[in-house]
Amino acid sequence: MNRSPPFEPPPGDIGRLVDHLFRREAGRLVAILTRRFGAQHLHLAEDVVQDALVRAMQTWPFTGVPQNPSAWLLQTAKNRAFDHTRRASLWRGRQETLAPLMEDCLHAAVAAPAPQFEDEIRDSQLRMMFVCCHPELPGETQVALTLKTLCGFGEREIAAAFLAHEAAVTKRLVRARQLLREKSISLDLPEAAQLAPRLAAVQQALYLLFNEGYKASHGESLLRGDLCTEALRLGKLLAAHPVGDRPATHALLALMHFNAARLPARVDDAGGMLRLAEQDRRRWDREHLARGIAELERSGAGEQVTRFHLEAGIAACHSLAADEASTDWRQILTLYDALLALDASPVVALNRAVALARVHGPAAGLRAIDAMRGREALENYHLRHAVAGQLWLESGEPAKAAESFRRAHALAALGAERMFLDGRIAAAEAAGDTGTE
């Protein structure tokens, strides 16, 4: 352990620091420990890393933050692993074998150079993503296990990403860990030919990781920039490897860069949500925009058009328009039509309804919402009612707009969203009082 004097941030910042380390380090530590103990003991690795983070929350406010917080967390996790293994009959008599492995694990995590790519993925977290996306697991389970194990997602966040019930996600994760134990899944990286089929699930996990940062599913803040940064980091690592260097990966990176460019302008000074039309485009990050364009160009190789290509194209239309009035909504609608043909989910249909309303008027958008396949799945999705409220308001129906906005407000999980909806409810009520929009 590093014995330098501890770093002492203001006490109120320690919780945020631990949360940041949890997002940045937990997956890496779990990946390192799981590789040492085997996939059948994934739950042990998750537990001891979680214990270490809880311990940090309990002690750092009094002792100060260590000079090397990551090493402290891994050392603490190692000690907790020893405690677990000493109590477990499965590990009795194996302490002499485990001790050097754990010491090697600590040394590797603290002293190893930055990962590089040659013939294999050497970044432990990205390696573990491919392990979680084992072909014997169902597709959604692969992504859920990746988000839980490596991205620090809770069951609640995963459920929000899949529009599923939290209990169903918990059962899915339990079955996944059980399969890893029963099958004794190897954590050695498969050959390139075996990695390729897993690529789509890895891309989907990164997509959902970024989305949770771009619009959080719960908590106090609308944005979680550290998740966006981590998704971009892992996406770049993926694109740097021959297995991941595919047009779809570059399209995904383009999408993430375009959306990351808008992060500085998505909230006002009070933390309230700003719609795209309300954002100060001068605050958009020009470096992210340039990288998005470059990645979109790289994604043009080959003949396959994926959902990432189409979503990146939509994001480019928004990001490159000088202002709201010059946005090419007809092109956006065309792209949504193609996206709906690939993914007929109600969320895609809802987004298409917004584009349709911009081209053909709010009544067309409302009809599209009523005609959506699987719209029942969105009855408890606040954005479905928020979109309907806005279209009712634009249609000159303030009473219906207010009703929809109130329904959205009751379902919204974030304070920033409720604050925004308070404003929309007030606007609808004012329009009803004056008889105007």
Image (cartoon, rainbow, N blue to C red):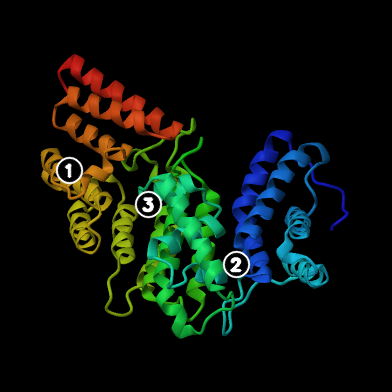
Q: Position of residue 312 (x, y in %)?
A: 33, 61
Q: Position of residue 288 (x, y in %)?
A: 46, 58
Give the quarter of the image for residue 182: bottom right
Q: Position of residue 435 (x, y in %)?
A: 15, 18
Q: CA distance from mark 2 to mark 3?
A: 26 Å
Along the line of sight, which residue is nearer the eye, 226 or 175?
175
Q: Are marks 3 and 1 in contact (CB under 8 Å)?
A: no
Q: CA distance from mark 3 to mark 1?
A: 20 Å
Amino acid, disc 1: Ile
In the image, 183: left or right of 299? right
Q: Nearer the viewer, mark 1 or mark 2?
A: 2
Amino acid, disc 2: Gln
Q: Which residue is mark 2?
A: 40
Q: Are marks 1 and 2 in contact (CB under 8 Å)?
A: no
Give the quarter of the image for residue 376: top left
Give the quarter of the image for residue 107: bottom right
Q: Which residue is mark 1?
A: 369
The first of marks 1 and 2 along the sequence is 2
Along the line of sight, which residue is nearer the eye, 334 or 63?
63
Quadrant of the drawing holding the C terminus: top left
Q: Nearer the viewer, mark 2 or mark 3?
A: 2
Q: CA distance from mark 1 to mark 2?
A: 45 Å
The answer to whether 24 is drawn above or below residue 100 in the figure is above
Q: Position of residue 227 (x, y in %)?
A: 52, 52
Which numbered circle lies on residue 162? 3
Quadrant of the drawing holding the N terminus: bottom right
